[in-house]
Image (cartoon, rainbow, N blue to C red):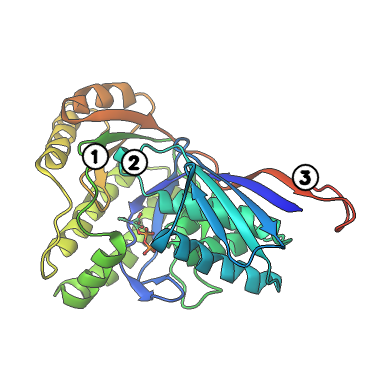
Amino acid sequence: MRTATARAHPNIALVKYWGKADEELILPVAGSMSMTLDAFATTTTVTLDPEADEDSFVLNGSPATGTALARTTRFLDHVRELAGSRERAHVDSMNEAPTAAGLASSASGFAALALAASRAFGLALDERALSRLARRGSGSACRSVVDRYAVWHAGTDDETSYAEQIDAPDLRLVIVTVDGAQKAVSSREGMRRTAATSPFYDAWITSTARTLEEMVRACAAGDPTRIGEITESHALRMHAVIASSEPPVRYLAPASVAVFDTAAALRAQGVFAHTTADAGPNVCVLTTPADAERVAEAVSAHGSVRIVGPGPGAHLVDETVDAGETDGVAR
Ligand code: 2P0
């Protein structure tokens, strides 16, 4: 029996991904940049089952059905194609992120699944190939393959669209959970709507490409202040282009906006605090290790807080191949 277990963490983009150039391959309209977190891991075990006619998927102890199962099967189809296999698999996945934290589990989920499934099916992918594979499950998952900070190169085809590590100063994110409610419009649907209806979409694409170049320069220069400024501007720009869709989508709640204001007030006092938010009401404040506690205390009036830092990319936890099947036990 072949089985492999892998772990991966969510990531928070400091330059955002919003919009696809190719829905099937999940190629983005522009590159993005993120911090892989040191918390909220997904741990996934993939076990090949030569007897089974279908894949099965258990998420947090409950059998998944419908869209969740269909997306996993579709992803495993890519892995089978790469491995030249027709075997079905059982996937067991545990997610440490509280649903209410609003952290997209699709990034950690597909990064962990890409690694566990590729190993279970006997593939030894390098980081770039693994990032490309994870991207097929969910765009942002390609960044969770990478340690600490990642740049996702938009690319123009399957081979050229992948994430790789980038050096950046040691920073922290204060995650503020302001609202546990499910987001009104999924990222996937929100992206489609923005692309189809926003009059500002072309400007979003061209400006994001430039912003990413500027972010890469700020990282290379080790300039945390510029990294923070770009982070907040780009997040607000993403929310602006989303809000300009028809019918409009607005992800930020009043409490989310209050966090932006609190961080601005802290900045005026010399504290490092720059705010970002994804496709939901929860907010992250980028700060330094020295200022993290102070920021967390100030924004705790708006929700529950958790300080996180840069963490590891997808990694293998365990792997077993029965003796006799191939070359024995591999670790
Ligand atoms: C990001 N988000 O860069 C942006 C910012 C949400 C807001 O990547 O359709 O779940 O699976 O490729 O990766 C969320 O989008 O979308 C996302 P799909 P994904 O983190």
**Whole-percent x and y of residue 227?**
33, 46
Q: Secondary structure at mark 3?
A: loop
Q: In this view of the protein, which residue sits in the foreground, 140 or 298?
A: 140
Quadrant in which ligand 1 is drawn: bottom left
The quadrant where residue 308 appears: top left
Crowd class of label 3 (few under 14; some 14 to 19; many from 20; radius 10 Å): few
Q: Amino acid at mark 1?
A: Gly
Q: In this view of the protein, which residue sits in the foreground, 25 or 50?
A: 50
Which residue is depicted at the point 55% across and 60% down?
A: 131
* Mark 3 or mark 2: whose residue is earlier in sequence: 2
In the image, taking residue 184 as reference, residue 77 lies left or right, namely right
Residue carrying label 2? 99
In the image, taking residue 26 as reference, residue 323 lies left or right, namely right
Q: Are marks 3 and 1 in contact (CB under 8 Å)?
A: no
Residue 180: which disc? 1
Residue 331: which disc? 3
Q: Are marks 3 and 2 in contact (CB under 8 Å)?
A: no
Which of the image's four quarters has the C terminus? Answer: top right
Q: Are marks 2 and 1 in contact (CB under 8 Å)?
A: yes
Q: CA distance from mark 2 to mark 1?
A: 7 Å
